[in-house]
C-alpha cells in the first residue's frame, strides 16, 4: 500500500504542475499575441510617417540577410529550446556594404596581340595589331550574396522614427516569447506522459490489491 499511496500523491502533484504550466502557457500566448499586434501597429505607423515606400522590402536585400537570433536544441537541459542572439557586426575598412558591392565593378583591360600579314610592294611584312578587351571579373558576381550581420533598423536610414524602433523591440520580444512557449509546451507534454505512466501503474496496483483481497 505504501507504493500505491506514493503514486497517488505523485499524481496529485503532477495534476497541480500540469495546470500551473498550462496557466503560464496561456499567459505567454497572450503576451505573444499582444507583442505581434503592437509590432504590426507600430510598423504601420512608421509607414504612415516615413512613407509607404520607405518601409518595405525595397530597403533590404533578402539574399544577404542573416538572422541575429538562433534557436539551439539541448535535450539534456530543462529548457530544450535555447535562444541565442548575435550582436551586429561593426563596419570596418575591409568590410563592404551591399551598396558598395553593387556600385563597384571590376574591369580588367587585356591587351591581345593579333598577327596580321600585310603585303605591299611585293614584300611580305608581318605586323601586329593591339586590341583592347574589357573583361568583367566574374569573381565579383556573387559578392552581392555576402552575409553580413547588421542591425535591421539601419536598413531604413539613420534617423528613423521612434515607432519603428518600438516595433523592432516588439518583434524581438515576440521571438523570445515564442521560444518560451515552445519550452512550456514540451514541459506540458512531458508532464502529461509522466501522469499517464503513473496512472497506468496505479491501475495495475489497484487491480493486484483487489485480486489479493478477493483471494483472501
Image: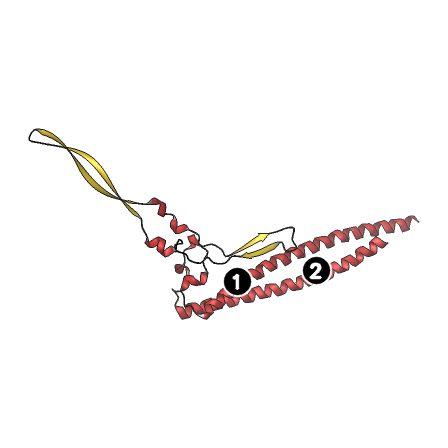
Q: 73 or 122: nearer the eye?
A: 122
In this picture, residue 205 sits left or right of residue 36: right
Spatial distance from mark 2 to mark 1, Cα to Cα?
Answer: 28 Å
Name the quadrant containing residue 95: bottom left
* x, y percent for residue 172: 52, 62
* x, y percent for residue 115: 19, 34
- Which type of secondary structure does the marked residue at label 1 adopt? helix
In this picture, residue 64 sits left or right of residue 9: left
Q: Residues within 10 Å of mark 1 (few under 14, many from 20)?
A: some
Q: 48 or 203: nearer the eye?
A: 48
In this rendering, the answer to whether 132 lies above or below 80 is above
In this picture, residue 143 sits left or right of residue 171: left
Residue pushed farthest right?
A: 216
* x, y percent for residue 109: 26, 44
Instruction: Work out which quarter of the rendered image holds the N terminus and state it.
Output: bottom right
Task: Please tell me whether mark 2 or mark 1 is closer to you in this view.
Answer: 1
Residue found 90% across the figure and 51% down from its top: 213
- Which type of secondary structure does the marked residue at label 2 adopt? helix
Q: Residues within 10 Å of mark 2 (few under 14, many from 20)?
A: some
* x, y percent for residue 92: 41, 56
Residue found 32% across the figure and 54% down from its top: 103
Q: Earlier in the sequence, mark 2 or mark 1?
A: 2
Name the quadrant containing residue 100: bottom left
- For residue 61, which numbered disc appears in the image? none
Residue found 40% across the figure and 60% down from its top: 59
- For residue 172, which numbered disc appears in the image? 1
Q: 216 or 72: nearer the eye?
A: 72
* CB-based contact (under 8 Å), mark 2 and mark 1: no
Residue found 57% across the figure and 57% down from its top: 83
- For residue 18, which numbered disc appears in the image? 2
Amino acid at each position: 500500500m505504501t507504493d500505491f499511496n506514493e503514486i497517488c500523491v505523485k499524481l496529485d502533484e503532477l495534476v497541480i504542475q500540469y495546470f500551473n504550466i498550462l496557466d503560464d502557457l496561456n499567459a505567454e500566448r497572450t503576451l505573444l499575441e499582444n507583442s505581434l499586434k503592437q509590432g504590426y501597429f507600430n510598423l504601420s505607423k512608421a509607414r504612415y510617417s516615413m512613407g509607404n515606400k520607405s518601409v518595405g522590402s525595397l530597403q533590404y536585400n533578402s539574399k544577404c540577410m542573416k538572422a541575429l537570433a538562433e534557436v539551439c536544441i539541448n535535450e539534456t537541459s530543462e529548457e530544450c529550446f535555447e535562444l541565442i542572439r548575435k550582436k551586429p557586426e561593426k563596419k570596418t575598412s575591409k568590410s563592404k556594404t551591399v551598396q558598395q558591392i553593387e556600385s563597384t565593378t571590376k574591369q580588367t583591360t587585356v591587351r591581345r596581340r593579333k598577327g596580321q600579314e600585310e603585303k605591299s610592294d611585293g614584300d611580305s611584312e608581318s605586323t601586329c595589331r593591339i586590341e583592347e578587351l574589357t573583361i568583367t571579373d566574374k569573381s565579383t558576381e556573387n559578392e552581392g550574396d555576402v552575409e553580413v550581420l547588421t542591425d535591421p533598423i539601419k536598413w531604413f536610414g539613420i534617423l528613423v522614427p521612434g515607432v519603428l524602433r518600438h516595433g523592432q523591440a516588439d518583434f524581438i520580444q515576440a521571438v523570445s516569447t515564442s521560444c518560451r512557449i515552445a519550452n512550456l509546451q514540451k514541459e506540458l507534454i512531458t508532464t502529461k506522459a509522466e501522469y499517464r505512466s503513473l496512472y497506468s501503474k496505479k491501475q495495475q496496483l489497484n487491480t493486484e490489491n483487489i485480486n489479493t483481497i478477493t483471494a483472501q
